[in-house]
Amino acid sequence: MPKIIFKKSGVEAEWTGDDESILELAEANDLDLDYGCRMGNCTACQQTILSGEVEYPNGHTGEPEPGNALLCCCMPKGDSDVEVDA
């Protein structure tokens, strides 16, 4: 199972698939990250992805800047670890 590494916070969490998004995993590990709509529309949850890849299985309507991801609606792609600059 991949790990999600929140670099600035110093938190590493295993992605089990129980959470619907990387944002939910962050919250389950007591991280307070910005968000708004939780649907990928407002882009308030946008964070830089330092390594790894994410996917949006339920889609999103906002467009993250290159190299960033919308944490409220993404999850790791495959079994690779994802490092987030948060």
Image: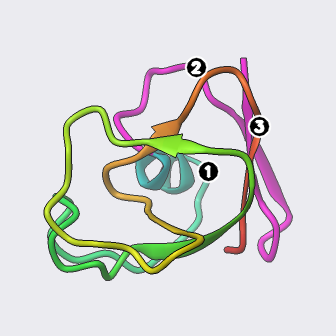
Task: Give the residue number, with chain letter if any, for mark 1.
Answer: 29
Residue 4 point in image, percent of width and height: 70, 44
Residue 70 point in image, percent of width and height: 39, 64
Query: What whole-number distance in Å separates the C-alpha atoms at marks 2 and 1?
Result: 13 Å
Q: How many marks?
A: 3
Q: Tag 2: Cα neighbours inside 10 Å, few (<14), some, or many (≥20)?
A: few
Q: Nearer the viewer, residue 81 or 53?
A: 53
Type of amino acid at the residue the image marks with label 2: Thr
Q: Quadrant of the N terminus?
A: top right
Q: Nearer the viewer, residue 38 or 63?
A: 63
Q: Tell whether label 3 touches label 2 (CB within 8 Å).
A: no
Q: Could you say which disc has been placed on residue 81 in the image?
A: 3
Q: Is residue 10 magenta?
A: yes
Q: Quadrant of residue 40?
A: bottom left
Type of amino acid at the residue the image marks with label 3: Asp
Q: Earlier in the sequence, mark 2 or mark 1?
A: 2
Secondary structure beneath label 1: loop
Q: Is residue 3 above or below residue 70?
A: above
Q: Nearer the viewer, residue 22 or 64?
A: 64
Q: Earlier in the sequence, mark 3 or mark 1?
A: 1
Q: Is residue 18 magenta?
A: yes
Residue 73 point in image, percent of width and height: 31, 50
Q: Quadrant of residue 13?
A: top right
Q: Could you say which disc has been placed on residue 16 in the image?
A: 2
The region drawn magenta spans 1-21
